[in-house]
Amino acid sequence: MNRTVAVGADHLGFELKEVLRRHLEEQGYEVRDFGVHDTTPIDYPDVAGEVAKAIRRGEFDRAVLVCGTGAGMAIAANKVPGVRAVAANDPYTAERARKSNDAQVITMGSRVVTPTIAVHLLDLWLASEFEGGGSTEKVRKIGELERQHHLETA
């Protein structure tokens, strides 16, 4: 796995993003911070879109996004074709997001998890790799749904 990780947050996720960014750097990851850089209000789709587009371009293998619940960031990031983002506010989901869903993006909610739990979830997710097997066909079908929708709306 590439040791470069993208991070981003809206104003509600700023403080937790900072905790996760510092943790990644302490673990030897190179981090590109897409913001926000303070608590000035910003709409989460703006940040999620930029991070997801960078994933799609292949600039990063993995990214972390934080908002109030993690749900909004996941929804926005998943609008970019080829990106699989999972809101993971518990250990099982964080681990399976990679192992079963091959998610390149994990999202978390600053109003849902504590910083200690968020660091634990991030570590679980980073340590996990796609297992393939029966999940390979499911991930392929997700990509096919994207392609079908793109052709229908083009």
Image (cartoon, rainbow, N blue to C red):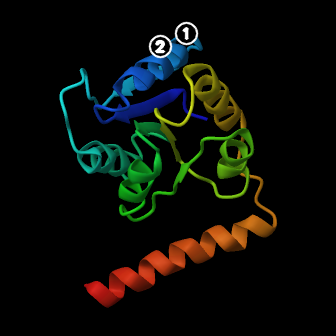
Q: Name the residue tied to disc 1.
A: 26
Among the 4 quarters of the image, the one containing residue 76: bottom left
Q: Is residue 142 left or right of residue 5?
A: right
Q: How far is mark 2 from mark 1, CA to CA? A: 6 Å
Residue drawn at 24 percent across, 20 percent down: 38
Residue 43 in the image: state x and y as whole percent.
Answer: 23, 45
Q: Amino acid at mark 1?
A: Glu
Dot 1: element: helix
Quadrant occupied by the N terminus = top right
As displayed, is residue 5 above or below residue 128? above
Nearer to us in this view, 20 or 150: 20
As displayed, is residue 28 above or below residue 20? above
Residue 88 in the image: state x and y as whole percent.
Answer: 59, 45
Identify the residue at the far right of this view: 133
Q: Which mark is residue 22?
A: 2
Residue drawn at 28 percent across, 31 percent down: 11
Q: Is residue 97 left or right of residue 68?
A: right
Q: Is residue 18 left or right of residue 96?
A: left
Residue 81 in the image: state x and y as whole percent.
Answer: 39, 65
Residue drawn at 58 percent across, 28 percent down: 118
Q: Residues within 10 Å of mark 2 (few under 14, many from 20)?
A: some
Q: Residues within 10 Å of mark 1 (few under 14, many from 20)?
A: few
Q: Amino acid at mark 2?
A: Arg
Nearer to us in this view, 141 or 9: 9
Dot 2: element: helix
Q: Which mark is residue 52?
A: none
Residue drawn at 66 percent across, 48 percent down: 98
Quadrant occupied by the C terminus = bottom left
Disc 2 to disc 1: CB gap under 8 Å:
yes
Q: Is residue 103 left or right of residue 42?
A: right
